Amino acid sequence: MILFVFIPYPSSPSYETINGYYSTGLYITDLDKNNEKDIIISNGNDMERERNYILYNNSFYLPNWFSSDSQYFGHLSVGDVNGDGFLDLVVAGFSGYYENWKKQVNVLYLNNNGILNSFPSWISDSVRCFGVAHGDVNGDGLSDFAFFCGNDYNNSPEEVKIYLSNGYTLNSSPYWKSDSIYSLGGKFFDVDNDGDLDLFVGVYNSNCRLYKNNNGILENNPSWISNVICKANQVAVGDINNDGYLDVVVANMGNVLIFYNNNGNLNPNPFIINNVGNYTSAISLGDLNNDGYLDLAVGGWWDPLFIFENINGTFNNPSWIFNIGNALVSEYIFFSDLDNGYLIDTFETFIVPTNNYHVFVLKHKPIDKILGVYINGNLITSNYVYNEEDGWISIKKQILAPGDSVKIFYKYSKSLDMAITNWEKSRGNFIFLNQNSLIKEEKLKRTRIVYDVLGRKINKTKKGINLIIDEKGNKKIVIIFD
């Protein structure tokens, strides 16, 4: 039997950034709106006070922006806090092993027409926060942020905190707090398709949690908890089985937990992927082979990097592995079309079903760029925020009414590159460029033998990946999109 699986990355990195940092957080976007990608990286983790940096304009080695402050920084996120149309940077402050786990501060760097301020425009109270997530909790079309806090290393649980935008910066006091727990990461997402953003909290050494959003008010007590004890690090969300509901994937320090979403309710008993290393820390979803299903990348501390191809909504054995031993300590994995190699323009139309409905989840994730948003045929240039990584847009709910038509024009990629932040200071961060640019589109001619992605002989080609042996005996990889 022929076993054929196609993951479009080389066996070794295409690029490696400058070393000398304990790199942690990662986001890729176009901060200065010049149609070139900027790679944002936070540094320090629990090992050293370091500055954050940006590789502007497809620079893959040397940073060309640094923050002026140095901390034990955790993960990062981006969003438009002040509504000026430019994405601002938010970074979590953790704590340092060599300073007796001293508390740090969370910070916000405002974006001034494409260039970030090097000094923070906002700082939080002293905390030990490792993770941060971007959302719009109250539906005002401005970016809010949740920080995931607590340090299990020194037995210091803390509250998860959400800070709202006031239109200029983040508020000085949190809008919402959980009880004191250990949390390294989580996500805002719409679990029940009711048009607002709920909050999934990954928890370490306890049950994972979901807090539902009820018309802009996040519940005080979780309405859902997992039936397993989590050791959660980072969290990803996406519709894995294409049933129209977003599922949750957790990097769980030794395995991967997938909480499938059944008609708006997460299954508390996860599907578990084992044999992914001992310290699973990083997780990401993206359609890497353009078959319409989200594939899964998994990394860990001193563990290999794995990619699992999505086969009709589930994952079996890894399809691609990158292993350099102790030189790889994966912290975050991000998919983006770094070289704009295969961008597709598209649009989607939504009808607002109810009052307070303001979150629209797009069919593709990640998205590359929002091109335009129209309400009842009228272009709006403000009053919305979006999340490229997770593929949603939130429009100020006060300008929407039931029955309104919302049309969103955007770009997405069929050639996703992959970047990984690496905590190992002796090496840099890794970039794998997608090799789909080597694939040509052409009309299919007569075929003699066809195999599907699992190597099974089939009668004719079907959507997804096919291995074709044509009438001349030539072997070809063929991807059917429609």
Image (cartoon, rainbow, N blue to C red):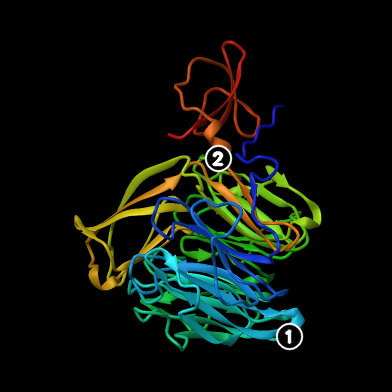
Q: Position of residue 302 (x, y in %)?
A: 77, 59
Q: Position of residue 252 (x, y in %)?
A: 69, 65
Name which of mark 2 and mark 1 comes first in the sequence: 1
Q: Amino acid at mark 1?
A: Asn
Q: Quadrant of residue 266?
A: bottom right
Residue furthest to the top: 472
State the residue position of label 2: 289
Q: Position of residue 429 (x, y in %)?
A: 66, 56
Is 434 drawn above or below residue 50 in the view shown? Answer: above
Alpha-carbon span between mark 2 and mark 1: 43 Å
Q: Amino acid at mark 2?
A: Asn
Residue visible at 68% across and 65% down? 21
Residue visible at 53% across and 30% down? 439
Q: Nearer the viewer, residue 185 or 172?
A: 172
Q: Is residue 86 left or right of residue 187?
A: left
Q: Nearer the viewer, residue 105 or 3?
A: 105
Q: Which mark is residue 155?
A: 1
- In the structure shown, which secondary structural element does the residue marked by tag 2 occupy? loop
* Crowd rating for badge 1 (residues with CA inside 10 Å; few <14, some 14–19, many 20+): few
Residue visible at 39% across and 73% down? 81
- In the structure shown, which secondary structural element does the residue marked by tag 1 occupy? loop
Q: Quadrant of the C terminus?
A: top left
Q: Quadrant of residue 3?
A: top right
Is 141 drawn above or below residue 100 in the view shown? Answer: above
